[in-house]
Image: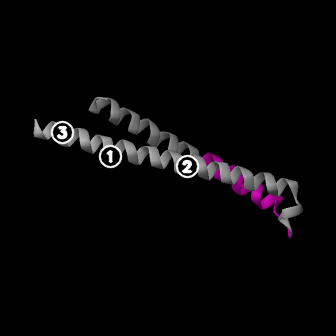
Amino acid sequence: MKLEELEKKLAELRKKLLDIDPDEAEIIKKRTSADMGDDYRENEGAKHVMEQHDIWYIRKVALKKEIAKLKLEIVRAKTSQDKV
């Protein structure tokens, strides 16, 4: 990929990460306070909230990993341009 394409993709991924954080975190926070009781293991609503939280966290970590890989590719592309 060209350097410009990598930087564009990086910007898109960062935007996705910023979009995913407040929206889903707020939903999970509201549901957590509404559904969590004394014993959440027997509460179906709380189980669903915890599953949503896990999925949200996995998506967030995957985006961060992809961003890190892109940053590494950009650094490699910039250093190879400097050598030429």
> What whole-number distance in Å separates the C-alpha atoms at marks 1 and 2?
19 Å
**Residue, disc 1:** 72
* Number of the front mark, 2 or 3: 3
Give the amino acid type for the residue marked by disc 1 in the picture: Leu
> What whole-number distance in Å separates the C-alpha atoms at marks 3 and 1?
12 Å
Q: Which residue lies at the image location 40% right of the left edge and 48% below the top edge?
A: 68
* Number of the front mark, 1 or 2: 1
Q: Which residue lies at the image location 86% right of the left edge and 68% below the top edge?
A: 39
> What whole-number distance in Å separates the C-alpha atoms at marks 2 and 3?
30 Å
Q: Is residue 28 magenta?
A: yes
37 relative to 51, above or below: below
Q: Which mark is residue 55?
A: none
- The one of 21 and 69 positioned closer to us in this rendering: 69
Give the farthest residue toward the left.
Answer: 84
Q: Which residues are magenta?
A: 21-38
Lower sequence index among marks 1 and 2 = 2
**Residue, disc 3:** 80
Secondary structure under the numbered disc 2 in the rendered image: helix
Give the farthest residue toward the right.
Answer: 42
- Image quadrant in which the N terminus is located: top left
Give the amino acid type for the residue marked by disc 2 in the picture: Lys
Query: Which is the main secondary structure of the residues drawn in magenta?
Result: helix
Q: Which mark is residue 60?
A: 2
Return the x and y of residue 47 as percentages of the image width and height. 80, 56
Return the x and y of residue 15 as percentages of the image width and height. 47, 40
Q: Is there CB contact under 8 Å for labels 2 and 3? A: no
Give the amino acid type for the residue marked by disc 3 in the picture: Ser
> Which image quarter: residue 20?
top right
